[in-house]
Image (cartoon, grey):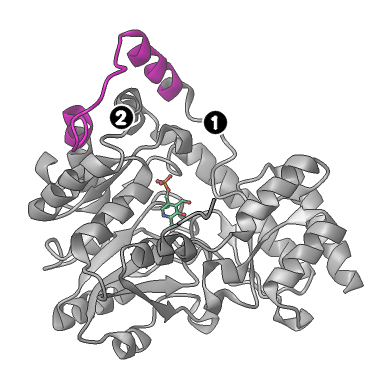
Amino acid sequence: MKLHLARRVKVIESSKIEESLRILEQHPEIISLGAGEPDFPAPPNVIKSAEKFLEKGFTHYSPLQGRHELREELVKKLKKDNKIDADPENIIISCGSKESILLAIMTLVNPKEEVIIPDPGYIAYRPIVQMLDGIAKSMPLKEDDGFEAHPDILKKIITRKTRLLVINTPSNPTGSILTKRVLEEIADIAVEKDLMILSDEAYEKLIYDNEKHVSIASLDGMEDRVVTVQSFSKTYAMCGFRVGYAVADERIIKEMTEFKICTTLAAPTFAQLAAVEALRNSASYTKMMVKEYDMRRRMVIKRLGEMELACTTPKGAFYAFPNIKKFKLPSVKFSDALMKKGKVVVIPGTEFGRYGEGHVRISYATSHDKLVQALGRIERFIQKI
Ligand SMILES: Cc1ncc(COP(=O)(O)O)c(C=O)c1O
């Protein structure tokens, strides 16, 4: 039978991440530094809370916009942690923050309109934009700028067709953060060019070196111009619970909520209720994880330095993005060879956009011992190139 598939299927290129996951399954001797999720389990009080709600029969659908208890709790969190004034009507709960990214772009961008995305940047932005027949335009992030967005570069990319600018702080894959000064410059550009901003803050709590996370929606005059997206996945190691959310102007949230009918309807009910417990009683668990990630981060940077691999010091998330240009190999070839000969998985930089070339992403959401072993293997591998 001749199979008729939509042209849209071509938007999703087969990913190196998926390929390495398949290989890892068959080769337990390989160590993966590819993970995009915490190696910690969810906090014990959150697991107990989920069990309690399941036993009590919270096994039904939730309202499309999400449980009221959770949105009420988030109002307090957003005020205290992000200086964002919201009420429950400004918040939608989604299946992970990824769904919020999808719903926001569905709501804000017409076919043929442009969305500026960070490059290198999170893998999902480009295919989501393209799937919706929008045009994804790269905003190159330069290593010389510490991978921060450069306002002068940004200004040059904006055209009359640009609708939306996606920013991500702390960043996947570079671990860089956007400082208040840069965010203010981006905010000024957004106002001048009448752009909306999607601010992906999935890693907001994973910050090091006494740096501060700043939400662009908290800057003067920005509250109506920004869709802020945050998540329980990384902050509380709750990836499998699938709870994230977006905060924005009530009119935007209303439209995003209507789209929920054709996406996931609602995030799991018991997971949303357990997320309330996370917000109330799991701050110390996050602190514990950040302390451990920070130790690993320092160790990774020190070891990469000993190997003479240049690496911008990550200030957030749990990734390092070392420069491998001196080996004169495309990042895909370098990663393939490292997996086959060195028995370590890293993610080639081009998975995050063409400006990721010359880099690989190392995740330190991997146990300390495995990390030490993997870095030893990388050192031996590069000595032989
Ligand atoms: C930058 C960024 N945003 C959003 C997400 C989506 O996470 P979730 O859907 O689990 O909230 C991820 C996941 O890796 C990410 O790295």
Q: Quadrant of the C terminus?
A: bottom right
> For the point 75% across and 79% down, which residue is it?
329
Report the disc number at residue 272: 2
Q: Is residue 369 depicted above or below 278 in this figure?
A: below
Crowding at label 1, few (<14), some or many (≥20) Cα neighbours within 10 Å?
few
Which amino acid type is marked by label 2?
Gln
Crowding at label 2, few (<14), some or many (≥20) Cα neighbours within 10 Å?
many
Where disc 1 sits, the SS reads: loop
In the picture, measured across the screen, residue 360 lies left or right of residue 278, that is: right
Report the disc number at residue 41: 1
Find the magenta span and give its range: 46-72
Queried whether the magenta region covers residue 138, the answer comes back as: no
In the picture, measured across the screen, residue 221 lies left or right of residue 171, that is: left
- Mark 1 or 2: in front is 2
Q: Nearer the viewer, residue 152 or 196?
A: 196
Measuring from the top left, give residue 363's x and y in whole percent: 62, 54
Q: Is residue 219 depicted above or below 308 in this figure?
A: above
